[in-house]
Image: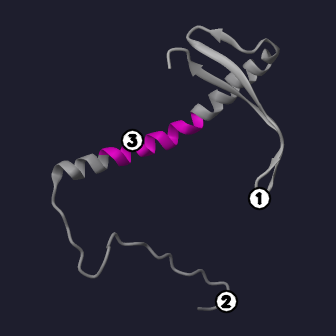
Amino acid sequence: MAKGERKPRVSRKAQVSMDDTIIRDEALESDLETRATLHEQVKKNLGAYNEFDKKVKAQLAKMEDQMPFRVGRFIISKVDREARHVEFDAEGSSSISIKPADK
C-alpha cells in the first residue's frame, strides 16, 4: 500500500467459528431482538437522565444547609466523603442522594 493510502475498512462477519452451530428458536431470537432494542433505548435515554439529574441536583445543592429534608415522597440527604488514597489519590467530595421514602 502506498504511503498516504487508506487501508480498506474491514467488516466483521457474525461467525463464531468455521463450523457455526445455528440454533433456530424463534422465541429466543425474538427475546434477543427485544433485548437489543431495549439496550439501545437505555443508551439513548441515559444521556437525557444524566442531564436532568444534574439539573435537579443543582437545585438541591442550593438548599444543602437544610438537609436532610423531604419533598413529596423523596428523602433528600447529603453524604460527605473525606479524601482518601486508593491506589490513586481521591479528593474529598459530597453527593446528594434522592430516594423514595417507601423504599
Identify residue type, mark 2: Lys
Q: Residue furthest top?
A: 72
Q: Residues within 10 Å of mark 3 (few under 14, many from 20)?
A: few
In the image, taking residue 35 as reference, residue 21 lies left or right, namely left
Q: Which residue is drawn at the image coordinates 42% and 45% (left, top)?
A: 39
Question: Which one is in front in this view, the residue at disc 1 or the one at disc 2?
Answer: 1
Secondary structure beneath label 2:
loop
Query: Please, is residue 97 above or below residue 84 in the view?
Result: above
Question: Residue 10 location in percent, x, y?
Answer: 47, 76
Q: Position of residue 1 (x, y in %)?
A: 58, 91
| Label 1 residue SS | loop
Q: Mark 2 — residue?
A: 3
Residue type of the residue flagged with mark 3: Leu
Which x, y percent locates residue 72? 58, 8
Q: Is residue 58 left or right of residue 14?
A: right
Residue furthest bottom in the image:
2
Residue beneath the point at 73% across and 19% down: 60
Q: Quadrant of residue 50?
A: top right
Distance Cα–Cα, label 1 vs label 2: 43 Å
For the residue carrying disc 1, how many other residues have a C-alpha within 10 Å: few (<14), some (14-19), or many (20+)? few
- Where is 64 relative to 81, above or below? above
Pointer 3 residue: 38
Of badges 3 and 2, the one in the foreground is 3
Mostly what secondary structure, the magenta segment? helix
Measured in 3D between alpha carbons, the distance from the residue under mark 1 to the one under mark 3, in whole angstroms, is 36 Å
Give coordinates of residue 2: x percent, y percent. Answer: 63, 91
Q: Residues within 10 Å of mark 2 (few under 14, many from 20)?
A: few
Q: Is residue 83 magenta?
A: no
**Sequence-first tag of 1 and 3:** 3
Q: Which residue is mark 1?
A: 87
Residues in magenta, as a range: 34-48
Of badges 1 and 3, the one in the foreground is 1
